[in-house]
């Protein structure tokens, strides 16, 4: 399901206009992104959480040549499924 299909599905369920739903989804994306950049954890209880993590520098290998190389430390985003979502996927 892509974003436009998601907007349509939510619009059908809620009776809200597609433009309103799209605006809300865009705002959600903006707020979550801003907060994660600031180092805040964003949780929608039971559904999903987003948080910034830091990957340490490490040594890797080029698979083609076998040569070692240094991979620098980097920030990343961790996305975790909540309990209700996990349960739904498991069928419980």
Image (cartoon, rainbow, N blue to C red):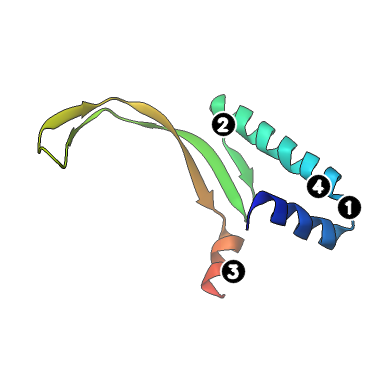
- Tag in front: 4 or 2: 4
- Few, some or many residues within 10 Å of mark 3 (<14, 14–19, 20+): few
- Few, some or many residues within 10 Å of mark 1 (<14, 14–19, 20+): few
Farthest residue in the bottom direction? 91
Q: Which mark is residue 88?
A: 3
Farthest residue in the left direction? 66
Looking at the picture, does residue 65 appear above or below residue 5?
A: above
* Callout 4: SS: helix
To which quarter of the image does residue 22 belong? Answer: top right
How far from the left and from the top, in percent, is residue 86?
54, 63
Image quarter hosting the N terminus:
bottom right
* Callout 1: SS: loop
- Tag in front: 3 or 4: 4
**What is the CA distance from the residue labelled 1 to the residue labelled 4?**
7 Å
Q: Which mark is residue 16?
A: 1
- Tag in front: 1 or 2: 1
Residue at image coords 57%, 24%: 38
To which quarter of the image does residue 66 belong? Answer: top left
Which numbered disc, 4 or 2, marks the residue that appears first in the sequence? 4
Q: Are marks 1 and 4 in contact (CB under 8 Å)?
A: yes
Q: Is residue 43 left or right of residue 78?
A: right
Q: Are marks 4 and 2 in contact (CB under 8 Å)?
A: no
- Tag in front: 1 or 3: 1
Which numbered disc, 1 or 3, marks the residue that appears first in the sequence? 1
Looking at the picture, tell me which residue is in the foreground, 90 or 59: 59
Q: Provide the residue designation for mark 2.
A: 36
Q: Are marks 2 and 3 in contact (CB under 8 Å)?
A: no
Q: Provide the residue designation for mark 4.
A: 21
How far from the left and from the top, in percent, is residue 56?
30, 30
**What is the CA distance from the residue labelled 2 to the residue labelled 3?**
26 Å
**What is the CA distance from the residue labelled 1 to the residue labelled 2?**
28 Å
């Amino acid at each position: 399901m892509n974003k436009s299909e998601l907007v349509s599905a939510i619009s059908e369920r809620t009776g809200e206009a597609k433009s309103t739903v799209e605006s809300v989804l865009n705002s959600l994306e903006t707020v979550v992104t801003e907060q994660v950049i600031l180092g805040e954890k964003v949780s929608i209880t039971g559904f999903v959480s987003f948080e910034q993590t830091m990957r340490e520098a490490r040594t890797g290998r080029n698979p083609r040549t076998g040569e070692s190389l240094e991979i620098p430390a980097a920030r990343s985003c961790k996305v975790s499924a909540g309990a209700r979502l996990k349960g739904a996927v498991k069928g419980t």
